[in-house]
Amino acid sequence: MEKLHHLGLLFLNFAVINILLSFVFFLFSVAGKRFISSPHMKSRLFFLSLVVPPALSAFTILTSFAPPLFIKIQGKAMFCLNEPYCYIFSFVSPDEIPLFDGLLISAIGLLLVPVIYSIISVRSYFRASATIGSLSTSFNPHNKVDINKGVLKELKDFKEIHKIRVKVIETPHLLSFIWGYRSNILILSTGALKTLSADELRGLLAHELSHYRRRDNILKGILLLCRNSLFIFPHVYYIFRWWREEIELIGDETAALSTGRPLDVASALLKMQSSPAPENPPCNPPFSPFKKGGLRGIWGMTDCPYATGFSIAQNDHLFTDRVERLVAINDGKIRPGNGGWHRIPSEIGFLTGMASLFPISFIMIAEFNPLLVHCYLEKLFSIF
């Protein structure tokens, strides 16, 4: 029972710190959304606002297994900073908190439900992958004789230059998105290839290339896990939605810069947006539409949490902002890429730094005193 109590304290410590930090970063996000103009800087702010609270909360739990650290405050008795296995309740006695056992149970539920949800989502992801594999074929220009030659050449050159796997789905709906985490695949529909001109397709492909190079699918998956850690709090959904909006603006900006024709990008966006509406609701695991199979299931991918792309379903506000921004870039009213955002590490850079924080500190402690590492591991395994 004592170990279960300590385990509950760990969960509660994580939940409390995560909630407090998340609301603080939400306030930063609201201010950034209002006063920052660069989509690059805003996307990184929103990314940090979702990632830092659970990451820092988890880090404090891991470090709480370090050997006891005693501190002395004048006028008070000396106490241990990292006992019992957490920080917050070293300062506040659980006996002083009403219904403390209920808080422990709530904290455990707050963590276990997202874990179960994530497991179901992984199952849905593999189901979606199987559906995509059964409906799509590898791109072969010789098999697409009914598509404009200029469009086929544009797609062929894109595939050869950037070495990206391209698969085509036979459907009149206009689709394009980057699929997958480990090895990204560009999914296109025959409807998009037949409807868009060569210049419009060049802009669309440049947008998708932005998602591919930024590894937005991986970033999106990480953000989903962080968002799920506080799934009952609506503010995390706002931050996640804001990040998704900014990466679409970044993709449009990249496409406008690489092609030099922002109006073609806007024209492609208008055509994609005006395509017929799907018959089935968007994909939202664990209630996946892929169990039905067929093109109706694939169309659900346009708002699937596992994909990013030019044709991802969006609200009217975002669609209007994207078109107006592209027109402003064409008119010279906006100069993309000049806001100093390149001085700030990318999302991948932030993740790399955060991931290396714990092992670097662990190595430093091992060099300083190997016995502390032994005590840390012994204390960590004693909880199980």
Image: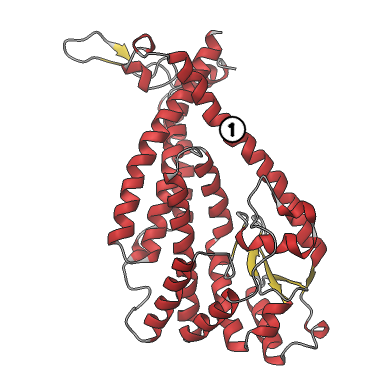
Q: Quadrant of the N terminus?
A: top right
Badge 1 marks a residue whose secondary structure is helix
Q: Name, please, the residue furthest toward the bottom.
A: 149
- For residue 161, which quarter of the picture? bottom right
Look at 65% across and 47% down and name the residue there. 285
Q: How is the image coloured?
A: secondary structure
Number of marks: 1
Name the quarter where the C terminus is drawn. Answer: top right
Above or below, 101 against 331 in this view is above
Q: Is residue 205 visible?
A: no
Whether residue 34 sits left or right of residue 268 in the image: it is left
Looking at the image, the residue that sits furthest to the left is 75
Which residue shows up at 34% across the image and 78% down it? 335
- Counting from the top left corner in percent of width and height, residue 142 is at 82, 85
Instruction: Name the spot of residue 228 as percent of width and height, x first.
Output: 53, 41
Expressed as whole percent of the image width and height from the top left, the position of residue 267 reads 53, 83
Relative horizontal placement of residue 113, taking residue 17 as reference (left or right): right
Q: Is residue 198 visible?
A: yes
Q: Is residue 117 above or below residue 242?
A: above
Q: Nearer the viewer, residue 325 or 151?
A: 325
Quadrant in the picture for residue 71:
top left
Picture residue at 58% right of the left edge, 57% below the top: 217
Instruction: Give the class, few, some or many, for how many residues have Cα within 10 Å of label 1's Cα (few <14, many ≥20).
Output: some
| Residue 201 vertical position relative to residue 307 in the rendered view, above or below | below
The residue at which mark 1 appears reads as 113
The amino acid beneath tag 1 is Val
Give left or right: position of 235 versus 173: left
* Front residue of this view, candidates 213 and 315: 315
